[in-house]
């Protein structure tokens, strides 16, 4: 199980980083989403992997799994969901207003009429 | 039980949050009333922060337990002289910014004041929190409000710069979470005071893992503090946004510096056993490069905004040189300089905004244009702010620089620090 989870996190991270390095907004957003999936699974695994253990106190439990990482992951999911929604809107507005989905600052900056600093 | 006055500690977080909700729900179509409430709340924050600073000035560290849950299980807020000073600095800066914005900038888009209050909540929370995960949460609150503020008023250039800003910060958040996960996996706690106890006791086999976590966090704070090579988002972002937003967002670079002091001074400080001063080998060299890059950018910039942005980068370099020494004289010099450079930098941004408004088509480019109204006053103010930021004698920047240079005498690398400070002075 450890190998499987570790490999899944690794692959998600790889895909995420590859996509983030592209110069268009949509792949970058997808890459960020993949990365946040990877980090969610990673955080979850930080409480150690255990099967069939309750996270809350119960009289007939043999052992417990750590509830704190689960709470952290919940918070992280909510935050990354909100942020992803925001960046999608931002990318869409940027595309509609400038007609390009490049993530670089290719909007010509105010041209100089001469004279430097 | 805590005495009623102790509950004041939570007010800098709660008050702006309530004010923002009230502004959105009750006053969303009344710009004038929004201004009154927003300025009133910010004034109140100045008062509260001054009271907290007076309370903390006896030197004791006050921990406020939310919901009275015992530490390390509950969430704590920590009030000491450092956090109280920064709260007061934030409140004073916010007051200047909100009064400036009430002059008309806030009417160019919607919801300026609610976003502004949410941002204050995030900044105050980040200064007060005593828990690494809550630091992450308050970072996110602060960031999501800053995205809104930054884009306030719109425009294609602003959208493009905004996308980069949001993307780099989302990436930083992911790295933050990985770092937090690693630290939790090794130590089993995220409370900063508890971490300071547990980090020195970490088994040798786990030390590498913990160090990886600590340095990942450093990467995040360095991004926030605009340390070279993670500084490139800053000029584009600041140049694209409105003047009050840029002035307020500037305190966010200070939040990065504050987090470096807290985490690497307290948790991974000199007493942390095998992990003592984990980030120290990186801070000063990166800060020196930052200083030089900032100075070069300053000379090469073609607009007032770019000039102000690179001045901020250079001042972050100076600040982190002092902090990176991780000793008492360095830290005290750094903190003095932090207060000074925040106020001087914000003044520079606000004055650049005023100049830009006056010049019409020439905007803030450094080219000759027809004389504007009140040129003597504006020019004089700009000159004062620039002199303060560069650190010429009559103003406070000079003292800060002298203190930093004196603090570096004990360090073995002082020739490097003195050498890279000289191009800054000549700019």
Image (cartoon, rainbow, N blue to C red):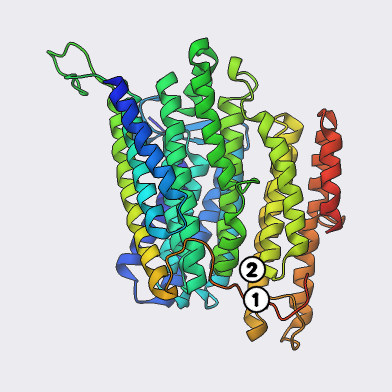
Picture disc at residue B350: 2
User: Crowdedness of circle 1 by 10 Å Cα count: few (<14), some, many (20+)?
Assistant: some
| Above-or-below relation of B106 to B43 | below
Residue B358 image position (x, y, % from top left)? 66, 83
Q: In which quarter of the image is the N terminus of chain A?
A: top left
Query: Is B44 or B287 nearer to us in this picture?
Result: B287
What chain does badge 1 belong to?
B
Foreground pick, B317 / B39? B317
- Give residue B370's quadrant in the image: bottom right
Of helix, strand and loop, which one carries label 2? helix
Q: Answer left or right for B74 relative to B380.
A: left
**Residue furthest left in the image:** A60
Residue positioned 69% across, 40% down in the render: B286
Q: What element carries label 1?
A: helix
* Rendered image quadrant of residue A53: top left
Q: Is any atom of residue B426 visible in this view?
A: yes
On screen, B215 above or below B311?
above
At label 2, counting other C-alpha atoms closer than 10 Å, the crowd grade (few under 14, some 14-19, many 20 or more) is many
Whether residue B406 is situated above or below residue B189 in the rendered picture? below
Q: Residues at badges 1 and 2 in contact (C-beta under 8 Å)?
A: yes
Instruction: Specify whether A92 is left or right of B210.
Output: left
Q: In this view, does A53 lie to the left or right of B163?
A: left
Q: Residue B425 appears at what percent x and percent y? A: 85, 54
| Residue position marked by numbered label 1 in the rendering | B354
From the viewer's perspective, tell me whether residue B332 is left or right of residue B7.
right
């Amino acid at each position: 199980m450890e190998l499987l989870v570790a490999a899944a996190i690794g692959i998600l991270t790889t895909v995420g980083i590859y996509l983030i390095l592209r110069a268009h907004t949509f792949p970058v957003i997808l890459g960020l989403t993949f990365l946040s999936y990877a980090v969610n699974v990673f955080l979850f695994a930080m409480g150690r992997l255990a099967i069939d253990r309750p996270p809350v106190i119960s009289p007939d439990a043999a052992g417990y799994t750590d509830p704190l990482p689960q709470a952290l992951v919940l918070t992280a999911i909510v935050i990354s969901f909100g942020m992803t929604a925001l960046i999608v809107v931002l990318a869409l507005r940027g595309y509609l207003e400038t007609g390009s989905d490049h993530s670089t600052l290719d909007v010509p900056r105010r041209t100089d009429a001469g004279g430097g600093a | 039980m805590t005495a009623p006055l102790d509950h004041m500690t939570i007010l800098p977080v709660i008050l702006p949050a309530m004010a923002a909700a009230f502004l959105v729900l009750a006053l969303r179509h009344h710009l004038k009333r929004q201004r009154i409430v927003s300025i009133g709340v910010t004034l109140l924050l100045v008062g509260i922060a001054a009271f907290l600073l007076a309370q903390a000035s006896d030197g004791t560290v006050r921990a406020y337990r939310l919901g009275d849950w015992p530490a390390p299980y509950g969430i704590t807020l920590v009030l000491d002289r450092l956090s109280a000073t920064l709260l007061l600095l934030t409140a004073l800066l916010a007051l200047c910014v909100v009064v400036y914005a009430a002059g008309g900038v806030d009417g160019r888009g919607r919801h300026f004041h609610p976003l502004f209050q949410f941002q204050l909540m995030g900044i105050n929370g980040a200064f007060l929190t005593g828990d690494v995960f809550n630091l992450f949460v308050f970072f996110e609150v602060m960031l999501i409000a800053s995205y809104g503020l930054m884009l306030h008023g719109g425009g294609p250039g602003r959208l493009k710069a905004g996308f980069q800003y949001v993307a780099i910060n989302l990436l930083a958040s992911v790295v933050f979470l990985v770092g937090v996960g690693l630290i939790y996996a090794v130590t089993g706690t995220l409370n900063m005071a508890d971490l300071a106890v547990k980090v020195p006791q970490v088994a040798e086999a786990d030390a590498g893992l913990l160090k990886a976590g600590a340095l990942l966090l450093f990467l995040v704070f360095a991004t926030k503090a605009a340390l070279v090579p993670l500084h490139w988002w800053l000029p584009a972002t600041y140049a694209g946004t409105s003047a009050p937003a840029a002035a307020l967002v500037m305190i966010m670079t200070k939040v990065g510096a504050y987090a470096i002091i807290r985490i690497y001074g307290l948790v991974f400080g000199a007493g942390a056993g095998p992990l003592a001063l984990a980030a120290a080998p990186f801070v000063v060299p990166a800060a020196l490069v930052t200083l030089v890059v900032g100075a070069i950018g300053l000379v090469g910039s073609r607009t007032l905004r770019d000039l102000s942005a690179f001045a901020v980068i250079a001042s972050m370099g100076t600040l982190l040189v002092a902090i990176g020494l991780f000793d008492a004289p360095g830290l005290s010099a750094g903190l003095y300089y932090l207060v000074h450079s925040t106020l001087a930098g914000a003044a520079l941004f606000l004055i650049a905004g005023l100049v830009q408004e006056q010049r019409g088509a020439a905007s803030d480019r450094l080219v000759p244009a027809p004389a504007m109204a009140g040129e003597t006053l504006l020019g004089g103010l700009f000159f004062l702010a620039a002199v303060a930021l560069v650190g010429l004698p009559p103003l406070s920047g000079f003292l800060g620089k002298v203190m930093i240079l004196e603090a570096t005498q004990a360090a073995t690398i002082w020739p490097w620090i003195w050498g890279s400070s000289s191009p800054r002075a000549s700019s």
